[in-house]
Amino acid sequence: MALNVSSRLTRSIVRVLASRSVIPVTRRLATTSCWTHLHIRVIRYDGTSLRSFSSSSQPSVDVSYEQLKKLLLSESSVVIDVREPWELREYGNIQGSINVPLGQVNSALQLKPDEFKEKYGGDMPSQSQNIVFTCLAGVRSKTALETSVSLGYTKVQHYPGGWQEWAERQLIKTKE
């Protein structure tokens, strides 16, 4: 039973991928297994096409400490810290970032620009502008990234090191 369900699911996935030209179909072979009721269709594909599909010309979703520093200096990105306001007061924040708590990201990115600026104290990013999300350790920023993508934002990244890595690196830098 489980094998039959698995086989149907596999065939469905392959059909969808083939219909969307993800897997170029070169030849279809119909084969049967030792069970007479189970028919398996094998679709062969060119592995290089699949590999080139999986590699992306988009920039990486993750931003390193050095990359974030450059983005902040050039002011080419909007950095949004999704921690709660009390966390920023207690631990500190990345200079130049805008605080939008994770629970408000969905509604905040749907506000009018003037409402966003009034509520969060920074310019609202456009859907084509580069946005970098950050938090304490990279977990909430990843969730914010997924939320923004679902709202149509296309150039979104996150800083997985979060405030923890930022503070550690900045502290080391000031000691030198």
Image: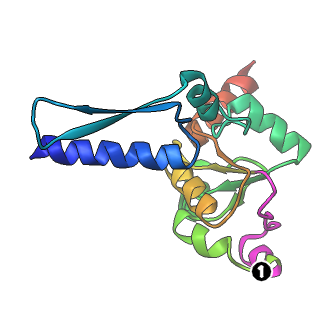
Decide: is 163 above or below 145.
Answer: above
From the top left corner, tell me how far across and down residue 41 is, in percent: 33, 37
Name the image quarter holding residue 74.
top right
Horizontally, residue 17 falls left or right of residue 95, namely left
From the top left corner, tell me how far across and down residue 142 is, in percent: 54, 49
* Residue 97 inside the magenta-drawn segment: no
Name the image quarter holding residue 7.
top left
Residue range of the region highlighted in magenta in the rendering: 114-130
From the top left corner, tell me how far across and down residue 108 is, in percent: 66, 73
From the top left corner, tell me how far across and down residue 143 is, in percent: 51, 54
Decide: is 122 above or below 169.
Answer: below
Residue, disc 1 = 112
Q: Residue at x 19, y 48 (%)?
A: 5
Horizontally, residue 129 falls left or right of residue 46, namely right
Horizontally, residue 15 falls left or right of residue 176, namely left
Depth check: give the residue in front, 166 or 36. Answer: 36
Decide: is 93 above or below 85.
Answer: above
Q: Residue at x 75, y 29 (%)?
A: 66
Horizontally, residue 162 falls left or right of residue 171, namely left
Q: Residues within 10 Å of mark 1 (few under 14, many from 20)?
A: few
